[in-house]
Image: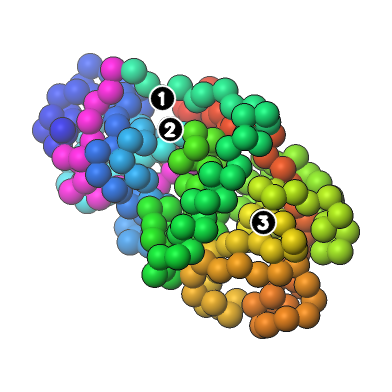
Amino acid sequence: MVAIDALKAQLDQCSPSSVEYRIAQPLDLYDAQDSKALATQAWPGRHLKFCFTKTTLLDDKSTLPVRLCEDNYPGWIDVQALPYLEPVNHPYQAASVEREQISALLPYVIAFMQAALQQTNQYLWGGTLGPNFDCSGLMQRAFAEQGIWLPRDAYQQEAFTQPLKNPGTTAQALVEVLQPGDFIFFGPPEKANHVALYLGDRQYIHSSGRDQGRNGIGIDLLSETGDTVTRTYYKQIRGAGRIMRGYRPSNEDQHKGI
């Protein structure tokens, strides 16, 4: 485990961003240095790197900038979390996962989400640990449990998947091409701000915020008729995508700092 003094000793002889750590306990990442707003969460076993170049930044700091290795996601962690970081000898290496493997694993991805639905839960912005998830956090965690990595946010997942129809496509047109395990994206013309997983028979599962009529995971229909949540999301459909491979961070992305 690592604390401030031990961290300084480890980093004195090298660039802080070159040292990688394994997360041993569930970890919250915040969206800014002085903010306690959640950006994302990391479950045990994930890797991170610090995003600073001088160890003097460790002095009198309550939060430290980091980047998660599997999805390049930045955030700030509380220094109280340092004892839960373990230096690793073997840095994270993204596995190569292609469409054929993904297709075989999709039933398990769906099963994870359906099991999450059965737990008492509510929508949590930034949530990936469960039982409380946000929309893209539920997607990322369900696929990661099967060794398939996705980018973190809905708009990033939209850019990463293979488009099935262009943004703005009607739900009726999507039904003709959607397969179980495909992604459905929602939001304004600028970019996706919500994502769901298609189950088949016009049904999709997602974690939805109370501002859209629910507070947690649910199953809805691709239909312009139905309850309030169904109608609300139908009006926001942008398009859909299919995951063809697992996400693999580029070398350039892995060396970005905050």
Q: Amino acid at mark 3?
A: Leu
Q: Amino acid at mark 2?
A: Cys
Q: Nearer the viewer, mark 2 or mark 3?
A: 3
Residue at image mark 3: 199
Which quarter of the rendered picture does the N terminus lie within?
Answer: top left
Packing grade of label 3 (10 A; few <14, some 14-19, many >=20) is: many
Residue at image mark 2: 69
Q: Quadrant of residue 163?
A: top right
Q: Is residue 225 left or right of residue 193?
A: right
Residue at image mark 1: 92
Residue at left offset 60%, top offset 42%: 106
Q: Amino acid at mark 1?
A: Tyr
Residue at left offset 33%, top offset 52%: 28
Q: Is residue 66 left or right of residue 207?
A: left
Question: x and y percent of residue 95 in the render?
Answer: 51, 24
Residue at left offset 69%, top offset 50%: 180
The front one of 117 and 125 is 117
Residue 209 vertical position relative to residue 183 in the rendered view, above or below: below
User: Which residues lie in the magenta part?
Assistant: 73-89
Marks 2/3: CA–CA distance:
30 Å
Marks 1/2: CA–CA distance:
7 Å
Q: Nearer the viewer, mark 3 or mark 1?
A: 3
Q: Quadrant of residue 10?
A: top left
